[in-house]
Image: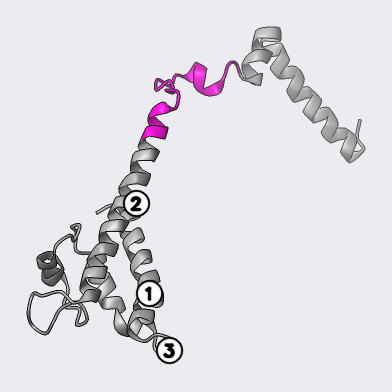
Amino acid sequence: MAKGLSEAIRNGLVEWRDGDLVDDIYPGTTTISGGTLLGDDVVQQLVSSGIRIETKEQLRQHTRWYLGFHGDTTDLTSHGRKLLELLHSIYTEYDRVEEEENARLASLPQVRSEVTPENFYGGATNRTSARREGGDRGVQRARVSRRARGRVRRGTT
């Protein structure tokens, strides 16, 4: 499963459990956290399942969330149905965003993929230019001038 999708699932589940799920089960209560109702272990099981969970059978196979099913049956509670609906909306939104991003990338101008020393460096370097202009004398002049600057700094001319 793509990292972006895993993050979207984790963020969506945590937001849902801390908001709507707590309000649905215990309206007006501030003493119960969403993590009590939908633990981090259940969130991690759903994120790391490796598949898109879209059916109650897949949900039952990958997690044993006590609020999602009626007892030991495969019958979903209203909270289990809401969880599957939330997962479906997360998948749909993720696919939409991915599709838009792929279309945007496809519309960008293509960049030349061949890299040669000439187009990598953008032309001649200063050292190459000095050699072209004055041959080795240009390089020698640069060395002499560095030595002269050093003598001036030391006070020996």
Are dots 1 and 3 in contact, CB under 8 Å? no
Q: Is residue 25 shown above or below 51?
A: below
In which quadrant is the N terminus drawn? bottom left
125 w.r.t. 52: above or below: above
In the displayed structure, 19 sits above or below 130; it is below
Q: Nearer the viewer, residue 156 or 19?
A: 19
Membership of 115 in magenta stretch = yes
- Cα separation, mark 2 vs mark 1, equals 19 Å
Q: Position of residue 11 (x, y in %)?
A: 38, 65
Q: Nearer the viewer, residue 73 or 139?
A: 73
Q: Earlier in the sequence, mark 1 or mark 3?
A: 1
**Rendered location of residue 141, percent (x, y):** 76, 18
Which of the two residues, 136 or 115, is positioned nearer the viewer here?
115
Tag 1 secondary structure: helix
- Give the magenta-colored segment's residue range: 103-124
Q: Which residue is mark 3?
A: 29
Q: CA distance from mark 1 to mark 3?
A: 12 Å
How packed mark 1 is, by other alpha carbons closer than 10 Å (few <14, some 14-19, many 20 or more), is few
Q: CA distance from mark 2 to mark 3?
A: 31 Å
Q: Which mark is residue 93?
A: 2
Label 1 sits on what residue type?
Asp
Viewer-proximal residue, 108 or 15?
A: 15
User: For residue 20, which numbered disc appears in the image?
Assistant: 1
Question: Which quadrant is the C terminus positioned in?
Answer: top right
